[in-house]
């Protein structure tokens, strides 16, 4: 299953401060729900893990992140990630492009993720994956804002949000199919 996720948000912080935090994998990982870096191989390669929950199913991915591009002058980054389900039941690949723009002392963040999922999670389909990813990204943005403000960040996943996404996706599928038949 392949899907593309695009996200844009604005921060009330100068671009230099946002870039310094966003471009440091050891710092930014604390904002990503369920993620941690377990080893830094070199300046561009890291090992880590992500634990995520889809309803009653908890999945742990052990993975690799490679920084393909980190252009501080143009505030652009490109990352490649690959994760393997720790139970051997699937994998996930991601290419993420991120770009920062300054506007009136604020920073606009734009990013796109191309995601490919194989295995058990792929059964849920792209709609559910997008809904859950959107919840995780919203939690990341909230965590990132808190971190930039000097507040404490909790990167544990919000289970209530994940369940809400699953219910929303299932109901949308049921009612969406009825609408098509009408």
Image: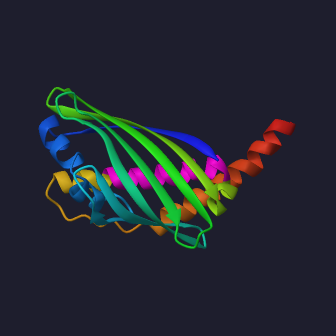
**Residue range of the region highlighted in magenta in the rendering:** 125-141
Count up the numbered dots. Answer: 0
On screen, residue 173 above or below 121: above
Q: Is residue 179 left or right of residue 54?
A: right
On screen, residue 136 above or below 3: below
Residue in front for this viewpoint, 131 or 116: 116
Q: Is residue 136 left or right of residue 118?
A: left
Q: Looking at the rendering, which quadrant does residue 54 occupy? A: bottom right
Q: Position of residue 45 (x, y in %)?
A: 30, 53
Seen from this angle, which residue lies furthest right?
A: 181
Q: Residue at x 75, y 47 (%)?
A: 175
Q: Residue at x 81, y 37 (%)?
A: 180
Q: Residue at x 33, y 49 (%)?
A: 141
Q: How is the image coloured?
A: rainbow
Q: Position of residue 35 (x, y in %)?
A: 37, 64
Q: Position of residue 157 (x, y in %)?
A: 42, 66
Q: Is residue 144 left or right of residue 57?
A: left
Residue in front for this viewpoint, 83 or 57: 83
Q: Position of residue 163 (x, y in %)?
A: 56, 64
Seen from this angle, which residue lies furthest front?
A: 42
Q: Main secondary structure of the magenta part?
A: helix
Residue in front for this viewpoint, 178 or 8: 8
Pick the quarter of the image with the C terminus.
top right
Residue 139: in magenta span: yes
Q: Residue at x 27, y 49 (%)?
A: 44
Residue 1: in magenta span: no
Q: Looking at the rendering, which quadrant does residue 136 occupy? A: bottom left
Q: Is residue 67 left or right of residue 49?
A: left
């Amino acid at each position: 299953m392949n899907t593309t996720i695009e996200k844009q948000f604005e921060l009330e912080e100068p671009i230099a401060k946002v870039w310094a935090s966003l471009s440091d994998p050891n710092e930014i990982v604390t904002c990503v729900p369920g993620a941690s870096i377990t080893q830094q191989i070199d300046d561009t390669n890291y090992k880590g893990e992500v634990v995520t929950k889809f309803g009653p199913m908890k999945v742990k991915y052990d993975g690799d992140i490679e920084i393909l591009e980190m252009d501080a002058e143009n505030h652009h980054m490109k990352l490649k990630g690959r994760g393997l389900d720790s139970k051997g039941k699937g994998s996930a690949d991601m290419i993420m492009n991120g770009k920062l723009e300054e506007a009136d002392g604020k920073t606009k963040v734009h990013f796109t993720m191309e995601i490919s999922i194989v295995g058990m999670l792929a059964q849920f389909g792209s709609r559910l994956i997008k809904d859950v990813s959107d919840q995780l990204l919203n939690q990341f943005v909230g965590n990132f804002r808190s971190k930039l403000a000097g507040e404490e960040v909790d990167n544990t996943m919000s289970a209530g949000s994940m369940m809400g996404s699953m219910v929303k996706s299932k109901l949308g599928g049921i009612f969406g199919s009825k609408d098509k038949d009408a």
